[in-house]
Image (tube, rainbow, N blue to C red):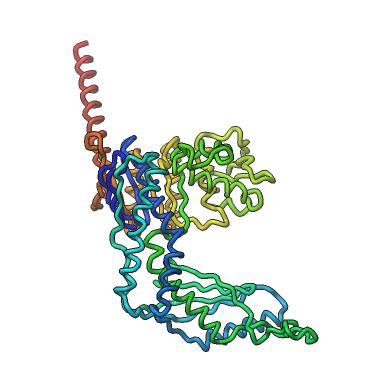
Amino acid sequence: MNLKISNLAQIKDAHFEESDLVVIVGDNGTGKTLLLETITLIKDYFTRNLDNMIDTYLEENPNCIKVELDWEDLYKYYRASKIEKFNDDKDSSSSLKRFKVEVEIQDTLEVNDYFSYKFKSVTEKITESIKEKVLFTEESNVKYELLDIPEVRDSYEYSSSFIMNDGFGILISDIDNNHKNVVSSIFHIESGEDFNQEDQEDIEPVENYLPTLISAEDFKNKIFKNSQKNFLKLIFRNYFSDGKLLFLPSERNLYMDNALRKTLDQNYNKTKLRYSEFLFNKDYLEFQDLSKRFYKRIFSEELKKLFGGTLSFTDNGEVESLTKTNGHIIRRELFSTKQNRLLPYLIINNPFQNYKEIIIEEPEAHMSLKSMNELLDFIKTLIKKKDKKVYLTTHSDVFFSRVNNFLISNNGISSKVYELKEDGKESFLESKIKTEYGYEIDLFTHELEDLYQQTIELQNENIDKLDEV
């Protein structure tokens, strides 16, 4: 997503563009959290409402997108899968059927104008939501503008896959054929009218001895409509978000302790609960509920390395202890600040939420230099092996230096580094340019130069005093 935000509390101007790794550096109070909360709110709105926008468009314009594939071959696969599962007497999924899809847009200008208008038409609604949930005020002139909204071209060719599972069809489309830009649709495969025997009570229903099949025409119609929908999702969904987003605020451990009480006792719309805290509470409570049943699937090898051992869980899914690699067992009550600080990272492994974007505020807080490096190794794994987008905020020169070295040595990782800079009572977001030395942050350069100069002066003063003695 590429957007411009202005008049967001103290942030006068911010032009933000996402990447595989985004780092926002700024002093305390410059607005890093406000900025990320606003970006998250905008992403969340469009992620929740995009499917409805697409459905509305296709209902009004059913013939705008022409879809061609080998219909006869796909229907044969469908029939064979139904008959095979019927003979095996199992309700299970079939094998995956891959096929080529060709898409032709009848009127590209009409499609592009429609979605551009739709996205802009909700600007006022989203702005009011920013005032209410992020800024807690009606007196704000905050504005945002979406930039570089994707546009459809005349034709496309890409791969899709189809699979049957317990009476449902699952259509998976991959427009880039690289498994990164992938969308899916799940739809029910209904019985055909040819097998309806409700009016013949004395005849045994044909469903008792034949698999229920829909006609080739009905099957084509279902695949056609869902292929249209998948195509538009491929074009627009990844602009807003690759998928579910997890927000880990700077005070996440405090929020974990208070999550249940605040969720039960308070209505979000009537309390001064920060938007990032509200999002984290929801994800944490869902994770806490699932961890009671699936805690063995939550702890990965990457987390084992990060914690320096293996976590043990109670039957209720609560963390009970940590068995370190040297065999030493640490009870939960005696966890170090670092170990407690790492616990929220367990949420990333929620087996029922494929978090594709992760925001981590101040990951270096309460960490030693060694622990910072171990945490950065974990973050590298999220980006390089798990295909997740990661957003970091920091005001630590040491942590940023390690991130900088990672980006210098990994040119294949796309990155954006921003600095929130103060200008009197206001701040603005400045995009940093990557050089052969990585990214330079003015805040760190200025402060470290001051520190160096002060150190030299103090040392020289001490040398002069020693010489006098």
Percent position of residue 302, x then y:
52, 51
Compared to residue 436, the image places residue 178 above or below, namely below
Compared to residue 89, the image places residue 359 above or below, namely above
Q: In the rendered view of the protein, which quadrant contains the N terminus?
A: bottom left
The answer to whether residue 408 of the structure is visible from this angle is no
Would residue 57 be found to the left or right of residue 314 on screen?
Answer: left
Query: Which residue occupies 53% across, 76% down?
Result: 162
The answer to whether residue 235 of the structure is visible from this angle is yes
Would residue 454 be found to the left or right of residue 206 on screen?
Answer: left
**In the displayed image of the protein, which residue is found farthest to the right?**
202
Q: In the rendered view of the protein, which quadrant contains the C terminus?
A: top left
Q: How many marks?
A: 0
**In the displayed image of the protein, which residue is found farthest to the top?**
469
Quarter where residue 80 is shown: bottom right
**In the displayed image of the protein, which residue is found farthest to the front?**
199
Which residue occupies the foreground of this view, 49 or 253?
49
Query: Which residue occupies 57% across, 49% down?
Result: 287
Query: Which residue occupies 62% across, 48% down?
Result: 289
Compared to residue 238, the image places residue 407 above or below, namely above
Percent position of residue 362, x then y:
40, 40
Quarter where residue 114 is shown: bottom left
Percent position of residue 144, x then y:
30, 51
Query: Which residue occupies 54% across, 53% down?
Result: 349
Percent position of residue 449, x then y:
22, 34
